[in-house]
Amino acid sequence: MTVIGSNLFILGAQEAGHQTEKVFLRDKKVGYCTGCESCYSSHKCVQKDDMAEILGKILAFDVIVMATPVYFYTMDAQIKTLIDRTVPRYSEIIGKEFYFIVTAADTSKESMERTIDGFRGFTICLNGAQEKGVVYGVGAWRKGDIMGSPAMKEAYEMGKNV
């Protein structure tokens, strides 16, 4: 299982006996897709950064958790860049289960659907991708505001039930 974000989801999944790995995008170097089209024939990106390693992890695991803070009602730039950079091998991302976790200052879950739709736009392009769950961490303006919220327990329980 590759988890991009959410410590409590990871904890729940580990307690259920699953192997997990967290990829923290802010600690990785992942450049923007330049649209050079080199990957169309080679299925490899010409950029020398951490994306090949991350994409290898995505291909290796059965469950992918994509977590993002919500800025202006969409996912953050790092996770959008990661999605864009899957182009060389996106057709190989087959039969994965996806969970989405979003946190935002807005208190409306309905307002977060724009962000979730961005994730769905990605997974609809993947063969056999299954959306298995969504956690809406709303009302979190500052770092740490989400701690103790119902969303944290929900992420933990979702991880336990993978």
Image: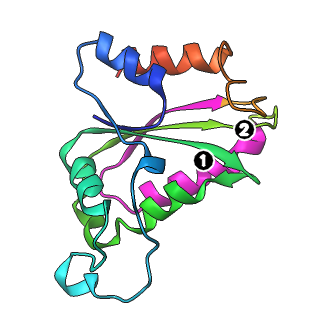
- Residue 64 placed where, x, y %? 35, 40
Residue drawn where x is 63% and y is 21% of the image: 151
Q: Is residue 94 above or below residue 63?
A: below
Q: Seen from this angle, which residue lies furthest right?
A: 107
Query: 42 or 99: nearer the eye?
Result: 42
Separation of residues labelled 1 and 2 (CA atoms): 12 Å
How many marks are shown on the rendered structure? 2
Q: Is residue 63 above or below residue 144?
A: below
**Comparing marks 1 and 2, which lies closer to the viewer?**
2
| Residue 18: image location, x then y, percent | 24, 21
Residue 65 location, x and y as percent?
A: 42, 38
Three-letter amino acid code at disc 1?
Answer: Ile
- Quarter of the image with the C terminus is top left
Span of residues in magenta: 110-136
Residue identifier under label 2: 104
Mark positioned earlier in the residue sequence (1 or 2) = 2
Residue 65 is a magenta residue = no
Q: Quadrant location of the N terminus? A: top left
As helix, strand or loop, the secondary structure at mark 1 comes to helix
Q: Which mark is drawn over residue 116? A: 1
